[in-house]
Image (spheres, rainbow, N blue to C red):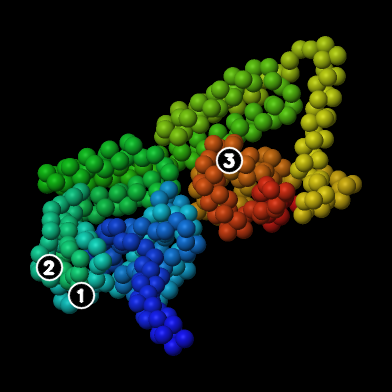
Amino acid sequence: MRKITLLVGLLAVILLPALVVSALDEVTPLSLDITVYSDGNVKIVYHVESDPAKVRVDVDLFGSSYNTLVVRDEEGNPLALTLRPSGVTVDSLGATELTVTYYTASLTTKEGLLWTLNVTTPVPSTITLPVGAAIFDLSHVPTDLGTFGGLQYVEMPVGNLSLYYIIGLPNVQQEAQAAIQDAQTYIEDKEAVNYVMGGSRARLEAAQYLYQQQIYVDAKAAALEAKQLAASTVAAADSASTKISLAADAVQKAQSEGRTSGLSDAEAELQSARQLFQAGSYPEAELAAIGAAQLASTSKAPDSTMLYAGVLILAAAAAGGYIYFKRVRPTPDEAVPVAPDAPFKPVDVDLAKIFDKHEDLRLEDKEVLRYLAGNNGEAFASEIRDRFDLPRSTAWRLIRRLIREGIVEEAKIGNQSLIRISKEYHKV
């Protein structure tokens, strides 16, 4: 018996360190990009590999303060998080890669004209210096250095890094670089929420080329044009999205009223509008959506005999009864009882109130909410996936995001999820 006890204790001593390492090794660092600004703020973009089977993981961060912190999965979807003293805990179930982006002012110090960046990195890092910066000294020999987009960068090895630099460039060059950096940040932010920025991105690249050729005046002008074009693109995309939603409502109304003659042309034009929108051709998408709405509004009910009309009425009544039975009156073994004589009450959703209160909604969020509003404020999750041709994981994260915002609620109907717009946003 004593030998068995000693053997168990020995195994515990041998295996305990391995278990601790396994518990702590929740993410694997992949890359680290550090962008330093002239005011001492630093932007961190930290890319790590995560175990998709874990419900949540801890990610240690750099610095002691984290501003505007966002964590996205490999599909670009934002994930829920909780800040810790040394980092962040991320709800990462299903995610294989995480990208952590935030700003911090705790990595830099200034003494006179000399700035110092101090950071300990677990992977090789790329450090991009601010406008007009000149490197004074380095703690390590860089693995590479150069310029990109008019900004100087150094690639550094793993370790406790210190980088010393001084800022001071002629005004023309500094203004050109500031304009380029401003345009690049704006364009990247919009691309992150699925706007297509082809034209403005090309103009930004032209500005960066001119800067590299030291043609600073023209570089600044090109950068300003790039940002202006990007802002126009965002406005065109939002307008096209609204027109597509209106066209979809017009087609749905024509279908519900039985005006099917000529409606196929409206549906084809609406599909074309959606394809153009996905490709980033926003003005063309808006024109196609306007055409679809006009075709839907002028569609007519087909000519038919009274007998045919009677058959249609009976079929519609049967379908309506089936939908009512499945959607409003679940079977006895389902967990959501509804009074058999409960009257049907149409829901009028206040979309304007939702959009005003939640200004950071994505385009796809708004499209789904418009669809729910036009569907009496509710739809099954499977219907949302089918309507917008979404992968199951993407639809799940979109719905979870709207639930966290308090915009929609989820009810279980049998083995399906019914998504309803919250009563807070029902018009009285």
**Tag nearer the camera, 1 or 3:** 3
User: Tag 2: residue type?
Assistant: His
Classify mark 2: helix, strand or loop.
loop
Q: Quadrant of residue 422?
A: bottom right
Residue 96 screen position, x and y as percent: 41, 54
Whether 42 is drawn above or below 109: the answer is above
Image quarter for residue 377? top right
What is the x, y in percent for residue 36? 24, 63
**x 32%, y 36%: residue:** 199
Residue position marked by numbered label 1 in the rendering: 110
- The amino acid pointed to by label 1 is Lys
Q: Secondary structure at mark 1?
A: strand
Q: Dot 3 corresponds to which residue?
A: 385
Report whether 298 appears left or right of 396. Answer: right
Nearest to the eye among marks 2 and 1: give it: 2
Q: Is residue 344 left or right of residue 184?
A: right
Residue 90: x and y, percent? 45, 64
Query: In what element is the residue under mark 3?
Result: helix
**Visible residue check, residue 286:** no
Q: Is residue 163 left or right of residue 29?
A: left
Q: Residue at x 83, y 49 (%)?
A: 332
Q: Are marks 2 and 1 in contact (CB under 8 Å)?
A: no
Residue depicted at 38% across the width and 78% down the height: 11
Distance of mark 2 from mark 1, alpha carbons? Answer: 20 Å
